[in-house]
Amino acid sequence: MRFDEAYSGNVFIKSHPSYEKSSTVIYGMPMDWTVSYRPGSRFGPSRIREVSIGLEEYSPYLDRELEDVKYFDAGDIPLPFGNPYKSIELIEHYIDGLMADDKFPLGMGGEHLVSWPVMKAVAKKYPDLAIIHMDAHTDLRVDYEGEPLSHSTPIRKIAEHIGPKNVYSFGIRSGMKEEFDWAKEKGMHISKFEVLEPLKEILPKLAGRPVYVTIDIDVLDPAHAPGTGTVDAGGITSRELLASIHAIAGSDVNVVGADLVEVAPIYDHSEQTANTASKLMREMILGWVK
Amino acid sequence: MRFDEAYSGNVFIKSHPSYEKSSTVIYGMPMDWTVSYRPGSRFGPSRIREVSIGLEEYSPYLDRELEDVKYFDAGDIPLPFGNPYKSIELIEHYIDGLMADDKFPLGMGGEHLVSWPVMKAVAKKYPDLAIIHMDAHTDLRVDYEGEPLSHSTPIRKIAEHIGPKNVYSFGIRSGMKEEFDWAKEKGMHISKFEVLEPLKEILPKLAGRPVYVTIDIDVLDPAHAPGTGTVDAGGITSRELLASIHAIAGSDVNVVGADLVEVAPIYDHSEQTANTASKLMREMILGWVK
Amino acid sequence: MRFDEAYSGNVFIKSHPSYEKSSTVIYGMPMDWTVSYRPGSRFGPSRIREVSIGLEEYSPYLDRELEDVKYFDAGDIPLPFGNPYKSIELIEHYIDGLMADDKFPLGMGGEHLVSWPVMKAVAKKYPDLAIIHMDAHTDLRVDYEGEPLSHSTPIRKIAEHIGPKNVYSFGIRSGMKEEFDWAKEKGMHISKFEVLEPLKEILPKLAGRPVYVTIDIDVLDPAHAPGTGTVDAGGITSRELLASIHAIAGSDVNVVGADLVEVAPIYDHSEQTANTASKLMREMILGWVK
Amino acid sequence: MRFDEAYSGNVFIKSHPSYEKSSTVIYGMPMDWTVSYRPGSRFGPSRIREVSIGLEEYSPYLDRELEDVKYFDAGDIPLPFGNPYKSIELIEHYIDGLMADDKFPLGMGGEHLVSWPVMKAVAKKYPDLAIIHMDAHTDLRVDYEGEPLSHSTPIRKIAEHIGPKNVYSFGIRSGMKEEFDWAKEKGMHISKFEVLEPLKEILPKLAGRPVYVTIDIDVLDPAHAPGTGTVDAGGITSRELLASIHAIAGSDVNVVGADLVEVAPIYDHSEQTANTASKLMREMILGWVK
Amino acid sequence: MRFDEAYSGNVFIKSHPSYEKSSTVIYGMPMDWTVSYRPGSRFGPSRIREVSIGLEEYSPYLDRELEDVKYFDAGDIPLPFGNPYKSIELIEHYIDGLMADDKFPLGMGGEHLVSWPVMKAVAKKYPDLAIIHMDAHTDLRVDYEGEPLSHSTPIRKIAEHIGPKNVYSFGIRSGMKEEFDWAKEKGMHISKFEVLEPLKEILPKLAGRPVYVTIDIDVLDPAHAPGTGTVDAGGITSRELLASIHAIAGSDVNVVGADLVEVAPIYDHSEQTANTASKLMREMILGWVK
Amino acid sequence: MRFDEAYSGNVFIKSHPSYEKSSTVIYGMPMDWTVSYRPGSRFGPSRIREVSIGLEEYSPYLDRELEDVKYFDAGDIPLPFGNPYKSIELIEHYIDGLMADDKFPLGMGGEHLVSWPVMKAVAKKYPDLAIIHMDAHTDLRVDYEGEPLSHSTPIRKIAEHIGPKNVYSFGIRSGMKEEFDWAKEKGMHISKFEVLEPLKEILPKLAGRPVYVTIDIDVLDPAHAPGTGTVDAGGITSRELLASIHAIAGSDVNVVGADLVEVAPIYDHSEQTANTASKLMREMILGWVK
């Protein structure tokens, strides 16, 4: 034991100490200031890291171990409280840097709006980018009560940016009629209620393409993820979500980045949701990073 | 903004301001005084209303919006603490009034006993009434430790009142042997454990008949509804309950009233159950009120 | 019982039905979007109203009953999510209206920033206004990480608006060195740690003056108010806070408005803080409204 | 270790196995069916016993050990759910038995109404009985919304039964104006807000008299006892309550029975209140049983 | 009502008062001192007993009532805090006694390590013993960070003791690669992820053999059992676990003992897990004890 | 923003990045395996660090800022689960290193036993060492149920090591009679119940001496620190504990090391205790490190 070493801190279990030597960078985006209903996801990344010490390093699903992938937990991106404009600017700039360094970006939210600048930055590098989006909510609003930066809008923004036909949403069970209508009209894919079965149909069509996967933890039923701001009954099980991650892992798409958002510890009394999120992160790393 | 307007208060989202113009009346029945195990459901209606602000107004299941139905949230029926006799008398009288005004009664409990005077009042108007009952428990006791007014007795009471053959119970996984035996002997329908599949078989037989639907939230597995007094493992998912509501909506029965009972906020630490209940209320409104 | 009456809703117990006939207006300001640490106070007003049904109507401290004062609970001022600029504009406009109608404004937060537009509006009517401020925190920052609208700034704003010598802070146990230095330099009164004893010394100096009292619930020790965003050990007891309210009631100052802010139900697992807040509201009404 | 011995069960720590050889009998009264606000105290006795395993057996306050007193934990008196009339009849009958056997009755509630039949039974044996009552609430109502059996009425009942001048209430901070007026008019002692100091003045006047002490846990401030139905800010500390128990122990009154009521585990998230109650029970045993 | 009777205590509902006359003995093993992640299961047996009062005595799954089986709840085996070596010695000795008396041992944990001495003792009597193990975790480690007595090792120990081919694990979704490899190499059965379907295939192979069944509550998904130390997403439902118990009941294996371990009340905020465990205990008794 | 920097991690706010340049080292001792009643303090250090982001850097009590002291948060000492012998050996070795480097050791528990090896190591450097001990419990047992390494024994061990006359305990309100007797006989100082007043009397006698201060958070009343394993009513307020820290700061003793132990997040539902602990840490740093 040496005493002069910097503390490794509250990092995701088995994080590699070197940014340079790591293919993948984990980072938190502790922002929840556009949330309309129940805030608290800003503390998600920290709690997911904390409970990750309880994880086994081996995945019996994928027969692979965490030490098989080098990932660096860079901590949370410092974001200015209450200022969504500057926050998304900082996130985009941060991801630009990761892209320049050829890293696989693996983010933890925070509210879903944080995915917008990430996807935008990733799309600069991969003009042919497709989005796989798992969520209870469409997130296709133009604005929320007049505010264009809202956790109800990120999928609309990326859909308009890369073209609605390149966005595939799964598990959707909540949204405004206008949002569903817009998606239909624009040719954007929405699978209502289900994730695994429609995903299996779509994946072959995306073979070879660069894909960014954004998972809102509330795609899970509240039984499986009570610790999130906007719980919505009728969701999928953690088993189906795991199988969906594994379906992507076994397909021919080229995952080039991903995130898991909206874990809110304050509603997660037994830390069930944070523990589930940390297991999902392990499977995303082992399944999607080659 | 005007200052002299009465506050709309803690009402179910999108409640219409006019009783007269509304086809449907929502009311709470905040009573839990006959509960043998864990009380607390008296605060259910208030919490369901409070969390309803998080609801989307559009149902992607039914492709219908809340503004398509006019409903008036009349608040809680004032009930005398600890006096079940007078409470059920007041409830019956209240529902008599609604029936006289041709309203669709949509109640929120409170303990399940509150459904008894409602069903009795509805049966006055619809002599051919059938009951669809979704619950973990038979609720067929004659009395509970000598007390005929108990949350274990409402289905027995209505079955004796309108005839056991007109009562259809689903999802039942708990009760005394005597209760199951009585139902069998009297020709009352009980589907054990399952709701959706047996319901699909029964619905055609009830085509054209007036039906009152009473849902005890504990028909859900404790994973999906921890916030209730008598949790009982092995229940259905919120997805199956939603599908059951939609199956009724798509059938030829004539729903003439309904309730959702036994939400108890004090056991509902992440407000998961109240949120689920508010979504169920939306689907009941959009699916059952023409 | 009539069926055509609008439900009185979730209003503070014994709220009078008429705005015109009431001397006092209670309103909620459900905003928490500038909070740097732990959000959630937007649900404070609703929960304080809900638990107020447990209140006795008589105060044995003041020998007065709630029916002795006519107050109208106007509900929550609708505020745009995530937009502090517009929110404070709307609050100021709302209070302007109350002032024009000669009402006693009694607000419930929400984060402390909501007090700024209220105090500004009240100061228009009472140019000689003094502020009594009970809080754990100075709230004297110029901005918070560059953002001038923050829950760390309301007292600075009002102090600069009406002059620092007219602001009296009590119970302060947290702040930046620069804030304490600024107050000292500008002649603003700050009593560190204590409320009751220094208040008794100050009150005679304010005799006859119009005074607005703003209470941040975190002036209480976390033992007495766990349900708030920024708990800070070493605070006063609820007994001392009650005695401080009564000391003002028994003095010669002319209380012309007041608020109670920062109750956050999500951290208030036994509803202890909301219950305490509802009792404080009762004493403020009975003690300060003539 | 023998295998054929009945498990001692969930009894108060160091309970003596023999009823006959014990001078004192501990019993639970798991009733909460007349509670108007928040029920749950029916589980109080069980939880107090469960946490008592964490107690030290020695009191450094009284320099006495639990083994110095022989007490038998008789478990909970079986009470019929929802039937207060029969419940209080059963309790009275039970205490009659203890009195006939010359036992010191030490009860755990349950709602405060349970103290009424206990006090009535004790008064049969001690016609000169005085009552010391520590509580946040007067409990002097004639009835509650027309119901004469309510947790708001037990002190009125015993005061009318043995004469109001023989009842001494301490720590009272809540009640109707009519209750305070009745007490004043009838010469019943009420100390508002404080317990220890007024108790020290009263105790010498009761020297030599048989005294029954009834403690409602809500005499404590919510900070010290969140786990109760009706929390009320401005109460005393657990330190003051301990000192009050010790003041009685050191006085010349003859304590002939006692109870501690209204612990409600469901609001007691960290089991703080149950732990405090179990310590109070220890001090009551060591201080009051000779 | 008699006063001289020992309190039946906090025992499992309908426990028979006589050890001699009972075929089955229920006992708790309140130990959690080798737990690496989140301790607390030592309080499991006590809470399962407490909530068992909410159970119906009749099983509609098995059409059998609790009074059909005589079982004696012997309480918790007293275990020395922090000393796993002595604890497992005491447990083994205790079970030796039960075996000598021809009792069916039905244990409640506590951490999973407690099952090791039980299985060892049962194997003395039944040399042909097979183990059915339902768990999220392999529990096949040789040691945990150098410590051979750990809750990660009990299945390894029994597998080495009676031969790995006699051990059948189901529902496993977590473990080290080395553990899975060891099982494969040694011919031990492991069904990953699923319980019911593979169990149905294995049961006929075990026909006529004596079988001990050990159930770790975390075989359930966290949605169904949040109240345990090591939650792990992707588990089975309580419905599948009930069906698995019933599949064993309907098979030709000879169940000679069983346990249910790892219920940890401190993470079980709505007591959902304890209630589920008490129902599982009922089904184990009614299904497995002839 | 650079991307190649190691994440600063979950460290105490304003931790200095350099061990060499820091006068003080903060470290966690995440051990709770000898705890007899309610475990969980192993997660204390991590949560105290997490909530420290809510701290102001300035102390209005001491008029000093965190940047005035250089301290390095070294993270948690890795300790082997369930092995107290090796754990205390590792802790002692770690502190030996800090002492050799002339650092001020500032530890966070974990259970109180961790203080024993720290105090032993500090005593090697300071043969004239005195101990100031604030706690609800004597911690003077020779062993706990035969086990000499227990959280009930650390003060006995250090007292025997450096002589009982050099140990001063304050706030003690729980222990065995034998422990109090032993202290009295051996001339060890114990102040029962109170901390501040007796401390003020003792401090002058310790002027100039090297002193190690060990604070068990349970010296606070449960109202002020519900988040600990062994809550005990009748404790001091956080205000008195802060004043006691300041009294030592203002005295002539030479504080040479300190710790704060027994924070257990799992019982700390609103994070009140962790927040209080992080403030106490700030005051200990600013008051005791010159």
Image (cartoon, coloured by chain):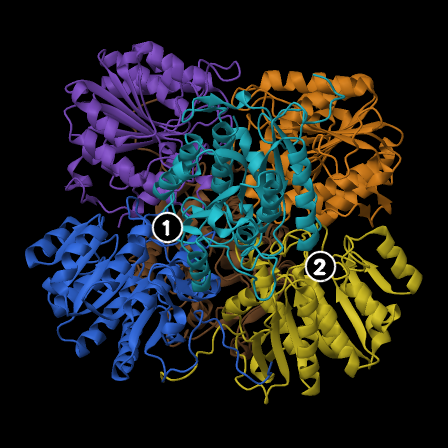
Chain colours: A brown, B yellow, C blue, D cyan, E orange, F purple
User: The C terminus of chain B appears in which quarter of the rendering?
Assistant: bottom right
Give coordinates of residue E249: x percent, y percent.
84, 39
User: The N terminus of chain B appears in which quarter of the rendering?
Assistant: bottom left
Give coordinates of residue D119: x percent, y percent.
58, 44
| Secondary structure of residue under mark 1 | loop
Q: Is residue D101 left or right of residue A64?
A: right
Q: Nearer the viewer, residue B138 or E162?
A: B138
Q: Is residue D222 left or right of residue B180?
A: left
Distance from Cα at disc 1 to Cα at disc 2: 47 Å
Q: Is residue A42 left or right of residue E212?
A: left
Asked if badges 1 and 2 are on one and the same chain, I answer no
Residue, disc 1: D193
Q: Indicate the quadrant where residue E6 lies.
A: top right
Give coordinates of residue C52: x percent, y percent.
45, 64
Name which residue type carries label 2: Val
Residue at horizontal 22 percent and vertical 44 percent from the top: F57
Q: Chain of mark 2?
A: B
Q: Chain of mark 1?
A: D
| Secondary structure of residue under mark 2 | helix
Residue, disc 2: B219
Q: Is residue B80 shown to the viewer in this render?
A: yes
Query: Number of callouts in the render?
Result: 2
Estimate how packed mark 2 is, as few (under 14), some (14 to 19) or many (20 or more) residues with alpha carbons within 10 Å. Answer: many
Residue at horizontal 66 percent and vertical 54 percent from the top: D84
Residue at horizontal 30 percent and vertical 10 percent from the top: F163
Q: Is residue E35 left or right of residue C75?
A: right
